[in-house]
Amino acid sequence: MLLPCLLLALLAAPTPPNPPSPPINYKTYAEMTRYLLELNATFPDVVQVSVAQDTYDLPYPEELQCIIDDETKATEPCKQFLVHMTNHSTLASDPERPEVFISGALHGNERVGPNAAIELVALFAHATSIYGTDDKAKPTLDTQRWLKQLVNTRNVLVTPMTNAYGYSHNHREELTVDPNRDYNYMRSGAECMQTMTSRVVNEIWRDHIFQLAVTFHGGTRAVAYEWGSPDHYLNGKESNPSEKSPDHMAQLQIGNTLANFAGVFPDGKLYPTGTMNDVVYGVSGGMEDWGYAASWENQFYDAKSQPFHACEPSTFGGYPKEKTIYNNITHRAFNMLVETSNTKEPKAADLGNFKELYEANVDFFRTEGITTEFVGHVPRNVRLALMMIEMAQPLVRWVDAAGSSQSQELLNVFPAASLYTTNADQVTEMGCGALAWERNEVATCSVSDCSVVNSVHSKVQIAWEVLGALTVDSTHVQVSSSETFEDDAILMKTSIQKGTTRRFYEFASDSSQAAAANVDTLGTSLFVTCLDLGNVTSDKLYVRAVATVDQDWKKQGTGDEGPSPHVPPQSHLVNARTNPDWDFEWNGHRVKAALEWTSPVITVETAKKSEANDVSSAIIPNSPVTDVPASFSPSGSTENESEDSDDSTDAPIIGKKRTKKASDDDESEESEDSSDEAAATTTAPSSATESERASTKTTDKDDGESDDESEDSEDDKDSDDNTLDDEMKASDDEQAKSSSSDTTQDATALATNGSGLDDKPASGLLQFGYIIMSSCAMIIVLTLAYLYRRVFRRPRQPYMNISSLEQPTRVTINSIADEDYDVDDDESEDVSAGPRIPRHAQSSRGVILSFSFLAPMEVFKRSRNVEDIAPPQCLSTVRLHEMLLNGTIGEDGVLALESDRRLGDKYRGLRSCDEQFNALVNGDKSASQEGSKDTDTVPKPPQMVYTEYLNCTGTALCEKPLLELKSCINSVLAGHRNIGDCAQTKRLLERCMRSKSEELLQASQPQVFRPHATP
């Protein structure tokens, strides 16, 4: 009796709740190292980890030892790990991908930042990598969708333990030096770049063009921005408020957005925001103002007042002075200070837990209608870093504008409009209207590849939002017949709308200001429009949304609220959206402005073509009924079109592969419609296009027809040879057509006697003969193609082709001499033209050597009297030239030597030969008599006849083989030898010139590079 009672008690007991989410704990230097290496090995498509000392050839000082084993306390030289997060498969083809830098901690005893930084990396990896196969370790689908867009369009570099020594020993300084007083803002000489921490950061910033940066600290609460130095208080008094930077408007708004998106503390308060001088304190040698102004502020002050000066530290073997002299590109970022907590090391229980990152809808955090309690320190600052990454560039993305929520189980499906609204009527009111929906005239789009398969749907309701921005000054939709959207191909433009994004928390939902700014969005931050396609005749349309954003960022105050210095905005971030002339390029990275930002293109295939082919049977069993708007369905040929651009590769494919819906049905229809055409071919026509397109259709059919469709789909799976069984039952004519088509598909060849198709399979010998004939035909075609390209289309190559010698190598600013920082003399006086870039700004450019078949005879025709113009030492080769020209020896090319401004001392003597040859070509007698010019003034690079140049420079380059060739030619002229005897000496001379050409390559230096625009 007791046992049954126990069983009943166990059955009646409530199911225990899910185990609580594990808390986030502090990680030591050793644990950080192991975790970073694990992420690097597991998710290489998104996360790549390197050691800065190895990347930038920095030393491992013996004084800096970090604990690598927490139990034994074993140590090794400290390593500054650098994490590079992006879609690495597409990075090389996207130089304009905006860059963001995140520093975990300059002060080693401020512990929240490093742990937030590494959890940021882990969240990105689990959410976006194709190697993230554990669904339990992934965040919510909406978070995955958002992070996938960011990883495809952002380039993020993270140093979780910037001060590696300080973090390992829980010590503020690196040894005895504060890294956040070690930059050359109001410091110089031996006072800056003393720590390995600041040198690592310096090398990273010299290598990139960051637009935004976050540097985490601890000891108070603040999100602070420039200015943060003693020289930027009003009237120079630290008791006064801070001066405003030229980019103050944008910094103020972004600081407010970061504080709001991060969320409240347990006491219900947000991060305080303001300038560092006001909410924290100003410091000399700080990283923040250095990252913002090192590329431009000096030019607006006289030499005595300039805040930036070169560093010459003596620690760790010294550091090159030229590495602290910057061009006008690299240091123009918003470098924001985040003070994470009132204590430098909060209690571990206050760090938060993983569910606040992986189970919450991080993208829609603090959105109206979604309530989220306060989170721990780590999730709070991960959110803040994510928002900073998003704000690097505007992002226009589509939203599913259906009247009711569609399935959100696939990543490539647009986010549902229900996330933005409180009821479906809001979207309908902004879109096509309730009446059109009642008449069943409206379709919607939920993916990038869409098909309107119901001719009743003459209108398309679409919705979109703008992220990475705060104010939308104007936005509209364009419909084009061309996917490149040329002006003459645009068929339709919708009316202009404006408003604010859901990232602009300044606008309270009940304020009159919000109502005025968001009249087009009804306070939803969602833009909706209705496209009337009734008069459009194209079968395929291309749709994109266009937005202009944040134009108020270029506004500046007056008086005490005016900028200091009094100049226009100087940051890349502001100018990239407000200044159309802004265009800077450096080391493979580029910042190019755009006033209009576009969404991914939606491809819409209308029902007109489908109607002609009678595809009314293509009904999906689970398609929505008439009272729900029809949705466009994804193409089965891709797994994650989502919001990425058409010409970019989506390597990080997140989530499960999408199922191809109704592909068999479409294949059946294609086969039926084209059966007559198939009878004349050896194989059935491919129906890949139709079979890969998944179409969703709203109809007035009942459920019975849907069930029939399901049966058809099952029959399709049973047999590949008979895919139209149910269709054949409709009529005898259709059965005959289908039978003919099936027979055509099964046949391997056409009958050769004209009697139609052979019912029996072809013999093995006949098949072998076909294989042999096909192989021979393929060989002939490839041979002809090769001869056509190699012989008939390409010009004959010169005998000596030294163009293959050009092997450009990467030249970084780390190896440039001091003298290359001088600006050109003709530019030094023009201050109004804006900052100039120093010589070292060209990252890689070598001397180019190539051959050209310029006719040497034209040179002699223009010179008229060769003996009067040519220098005496060159007259002996005139006869040699004549032999070359009349074909006795053969045709030689012309060496085009594109010299740089500065050659090595070893080759400066060649300039006299250049001038002599210029006189020979141009007919200028006086030019050959002038001496060498100033070393900084080089004539325009000449083009030299090969043998003439060798004769003039033979002493310096290849004297012996040149003399041997001359001697051989003289013997030929005297009749003692044949011309063929000179071939070997000629080859020896050319081999010598190849070697000397390589020396010319090594002796050259990069030319001056100037950006297209200066501020």
Image: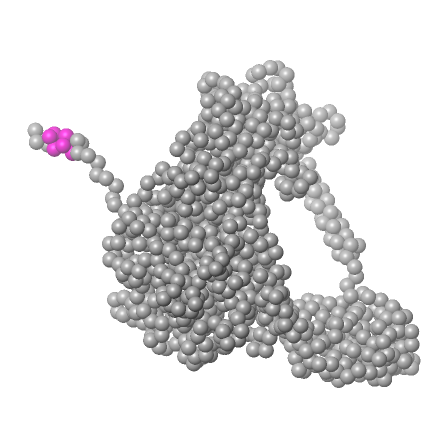
In the rendered image, the vertical position of residue 607 relative to residue 172, given as above or below: above
Asked if residue 657 shows in the view, the reply is no
What residue occupies the far left of the structure in this picture?
1
Q: Magenta part of the protein: which range?
A: 4-10
Rendered image quadrant of residue 929: bottom right
Q: Where is residue 476 in the image (x, y as percent from the top left)?
A: 56, 39
- Tell me, yes or no, whether the highlighted magenta stretch contains residue 779: no
SS majority, magenta: helix
What residue occupies the far top of the structure in this picture?
731
Residue drawn at (28%, 48%), measured in percent from left and top?
A: 268
In the rendered image, the vertical position of residue 731 relative to residue 520, given as above or below: above
Q: Position of residue 1008 (x, y in %)?
A: 63, 69
Q: In which quarter of the image is the N terminus?
A: top left
Residue drawn at (47%, 17%), measured in percent from left and top?
A: 702
In the rendered image, the vertical position of residue 438 relative to residue 46, given as above or below: above
Residue drawn at (90%, 80%), measured in percent from left and top?
A: 867
228 vs 977, left or right, is left
Asked if residue 489 shows in the view, the reply is yes
